[in-house]
Amino acid sequence: MKMRTTTLAAALPAVLALVPAFAGAETIRIATIESLTGTFAPIGQNRLETFQFMADLANANDWAGADNDFEVTGFDGKASPQESVIQLKRAIDQGYRYIGSGNGSNVAFALVDAVNKHNSRNPGKEVILFNYSSIDPDLTNSKCSFYAFHFDSNTNMKIEVMANAIKDDPDVKKVFIIGQDYSHGHQVSRAAKDALARLSPDVEVVGDDLHPVGSVKDFAPYIAKIKASGADTVITGNWGSDLALLVKAAESAGVKAKFYTFYANNTGSPTSIGASGADRVKVVTNWHSNADFDTEKGMVATYKEKFDDDLYMQYLESVVGMLGKAVQKTGSLDPVENAFAMEGMTFDAMHGEVEMRADDHQLQQPLYVATWTKTDGGEVKYDQENTGYGWKTDTRLERDLATQPTTCEMDRPQR
């Protein structure tokens, strides 16, 4: 399924007024494989629109040089590893050499493997993968690849930030861990238990449960286990409807535990959380709309006006920005040359300077812990999904504090 690229020239008057008219001579074509139909389609659609938004912003500001223009096209992977690999082959057949990858980690593993095989069999026609949503740490450790770059902070990085926040919260005594039954959910469970044992040995893990991905319609039985455990805090890596329904079931059952999450700011979850999650649902994220580094660029309001939706996938600014910077450096659209150029690159993103670590291609960036809070016109200016609630920063960790070691032993092509 191909989606049309959206031009934002009319929606970015403040930005466009500052730059000359763009006349592109080369087009940097990016095919991004997302879940554009099915249960997780609202999230996939938001990410595709954000990718296109950032591409248009880059074009307006010549991020890839005055002679080069970005174009982003969506392919529907249906959140399926098998279907995503089929879409990858379609994209390659159509000449795409830059590939984006959304949720989840099972999809990302399949795409990394397929990209590695394609590149080994087709020298001179290599493709590069930009993973901006899947955070299994194995992607930048045992399964790292020269041909894959990872822009979302991985599970170990987010759990480290989360565990430090819990360490400083005297109300947390008993923690229940629940997640989706695939590699991501398993990694969250492992990392959370390891970090809590190290940083908060007095905190008791009173439950650890997994459920099928995207097919549970009634979370009441899982919430009953949480309630029976006496947990005052829940840690979950759930995303999409699996998070929204989990929080909604907790409210229905009168469970007042805090929820430490990775994806409570993703499409659909804010509406489900609503007032019931105020002051107790938290998210670990690289950026949110009330963070310090956004509003001067006007992106939040412009995105809302254009799509009647909320900007939260800031990672995609770094994808486009770093690729544009690489193209300017190499003077080439060749993926391998630009992959080398991106190694160790820094980029001034809207939340501060970020760095693509050469060792494992894991983006190093600041991270926030934020709490779902009623808007106040000041510190919490922007809400999400017209709920009247938005995110308030609890703490921000600079990139050197959120970094984690890697065991990646990367094989690089000869130059």
Image (cartoon, grey):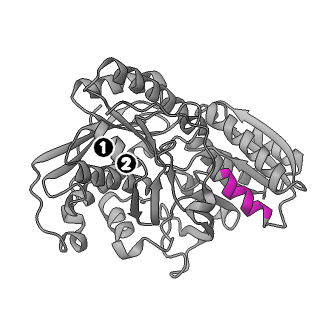
Q: Which quadrant is home to the N terminus?
A: top left
Mark 1 residue element: helix
Relative to 205, residue 139 above or below: above
**Is residue 401 or residue 177 the one in the foreground?**
401
Circle on res. 338:
1
Q: Residues within 10 Å of mark 1 (few under 14, many from 20)?
A: many
Counting from the top left corner in percent of width and height, residue 104 is at: 52, 36
Label 2, label 1: how far apart the Cα atoms are: 6 Å
Mark 2: few, some, or many residues within 10 Å (few <14, many ≥20)?
many
Classify 393 as above or below 259: below
Any magenta on residue 125? no
Q: Position of residue 63 (x, y in %)?
A: 25, 58
Of residues 408 and 291, the one nearer the viewer is 408
Label 2's element? Answer: helix
Residue 142 is at least partly visible in this image: yes
In front here: 113 or 49?
113
Which residue reaches farthest top?
121
Q: Are marks 2 and 1 in contact (CB under 8 Å)?
A: yes
The residue under the point 59% across, 31% down is 142
Q: Quadrant of residue 23?
A: bottom left
Identity, as a three-letter code, of the amino acid under mark 2: Met
The residue identified by callout 2 is 342
Magenta portion: prevailing SS class = helix
Residue 221 in view in this figure: no
Question: Which residue, as the protein is rendered here, is positioned at the far bottom?
Answer: 378
Q: Which residues are magenta?
A: 159-167
Task: Please tell me which residue is depicted at 61% across the width and 51% down the height of the picture.
Answer: 262
